[in-house]
Image (cartoon, grey):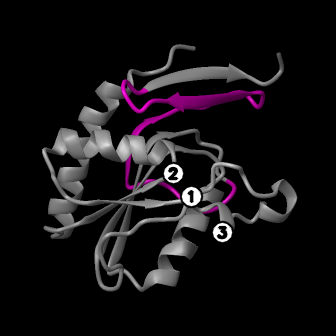
């Protein structure tokens, strides 16, 4: 299986996101990337949009439902939201949507900061393996992987996708 080029996906996503926001009448969205890959995708997307909007970052480690099983990841950093959440139209950006648990954790954290007017979910890849009823509003590509396969994003520049085989 060959993976799509992230730069091509970002360009397509910028066009789709612009149309989505216009359709919803959203003129001043607030952008938030989920650490780490989502922040890289968000930075590339803001660049493709020609936007100089501030970028918020979320580290959802403390909000994960598997925190007690997996413990704290050594790279945990605090979230940074340089704007109000209450009443704002948010664009939440992640790299790979798999089970939906990271997005659920991100939404829980965001609502601890306030009640947004809306949340638009943008993902570079949707692996079509959802465990929760969560799907992106804007997606670069949807892939169906075998159970032993995963996709890893590396970056931030350039963004590159790698297919990993857990069976090896």
Q: Which residue is mark 2?
A: 35
Q: Residues within 10 Å of mark 1 (few under 14, many from 20)?
A: few
Q: Residue at x 51, y 46 (%)?
A: 36
Task: Calculate the distance from the C-alpha at mark 3 to the C-alpha at mark 2.
Answer: 13 Å
Task: Look at the numbered disc 2 and give the secondary structure of its residue.
Answer: loop
Q: Residue at x 38, y 27 (%)?
A: 6
**Image quadrant where residue 103 sits:** bottom right
101 vs 139: above or below: below
Provide residue 154's location: percent of width, then percent of height.
50, 28
Provide residue 48's location: percent of width, then percent of height.
20, 38
> Any magenta on residue 154?
yes
Q: Which residue is mark 3?
A: 63
Q: Residues within 10 Å of mark 2 (few under 14, many from 20)?
A: many
Q: Which residue is mark 1?
A: 77
Left or right of 71: which side holds 99?
left
Residue 11 vs residue 142, the one in the foreground:
11
Task: Calculate the distance from the C-alpha at mark 1 to the C-alpha at mark 2.
Answer: 9 Å
């Amino acid at each position: 299986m060959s993976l799509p080029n992230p730069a091509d996906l970002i360009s397509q996503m910028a066009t789709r996101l612009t149309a989505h926001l216009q359709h919803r009448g959203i003129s001043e969205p607030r952008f938030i990337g989920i650490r780490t890959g989502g922040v890289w995708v968000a930075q590339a997307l803001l660049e493709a949009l020609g936007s100089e909007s501030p970028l918020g970052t979320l580290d959802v480690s403390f909000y994960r439902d598997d925190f007690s099983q997996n413990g704290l990841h050594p790279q945990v950093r605090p979230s940074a939201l340089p704007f109000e959440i209450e009443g704002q139209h948010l664009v939440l950006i992640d790299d790979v949507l798999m089970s939906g648990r990271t997005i659920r954790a991100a939404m829980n954290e965001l609502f601890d900061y306030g009640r947004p007017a809306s949340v638009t979910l943008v993902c570079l890849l949707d692996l079509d393996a959802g465990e929760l009823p969560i799907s992106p509003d804007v997606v670069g590509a949807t892939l169906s992987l075998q159970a032993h396969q995963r996709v890893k994003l590396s970056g931030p520049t350039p963004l590159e996708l790698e297919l990993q085989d857990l069976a090896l």
